[in-house]
Image (cartoon, rainbow, N blue to C red):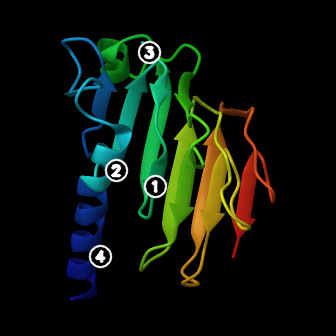
Amino acid sequence: MKKVFTFIGLMLASVHSLAVPVTLGNDANCTYNIANTSIQNLVDGFAGEIRVTKQIEIVENIQIDRSILIQGGYENCNDAQLGIKNGVTTINGNNQAPVISISDGNDLITVIIDSLKLKNGVGLGSQQGGGISVRETNNNGIKIVLRRSIVSNNNGNFGGGVFLYG
């Protein structure tokens, strides 16, 4: 019986790792077009991996409460589908809120930010950062990985670039 459960567990882990990434940009090869879909829409829609082109600067403030991988630096969606990166994708917080706000849900979450430039975010209130604001309040844990990313030109009373609480 133990072997059966181990096998089922391995099958489920394999299926999860084979999830197809979605692409976001402004060319015909994209899964979603940036003109009518935001990164937030894809986060809310339970996309596990989002690959964003660097065709345009994205103006957005993103809220995350689940495990996700957001990758940028792709010239176009064909390159994104093939995993060919060159540089970073810029996300501009437009001085409205943190560029990315992360909070824990009901389980441990892992957020991976890869090849993104996060700029012009602002931490509103006493416990927020401008670029990335992380609040762990349910004691479930948040794991954050930043790869090949830039956090610059952000403002906040308790962490212009990154604020961690929890």
Query: Label 3: which residue?
Result: 56
The residue sitting at 79% across, 54% down in the picture is: 159
Q: CA distance from mark 2 to mark 1?
A: 8 Å
Q: Is residue 30 above or below residue 153?
A: above
- 78 to the left or right of 144: left
Of the two numbered discs 2 and 1 on the same chain, state the one appearing first in sequence.
2
* Discs 2, 1 touching: Cβ within 8 Å: yes
| Front-most of residues 9 and 117 | 117
Neighbourhood count class around disc 1 (C-alpha, 10 Å): few under 14, some 14–19, many 20 upward? some
Residue 63: assigned label: 1
Q: State whether residue 164 is above or below residue 122.
A: below
Discs 2/4, front: 2
Give the foreground label among 1 and 4. Answer: 1
Labelled disc at residue 91: none
- Is 78 drawn above or below residue 165 in the view shown? above
Q: Tell me the SS state at disc 4.
A: helix
| Residue 28 image offset from top left, x and y in percent | 18, 12
Circles 2 and 4 in contact, beta carbons < 8 Å: no
- Asked which secondary structure carries label 1, the reply is strand
Please give the label number shown on residue 6.
4
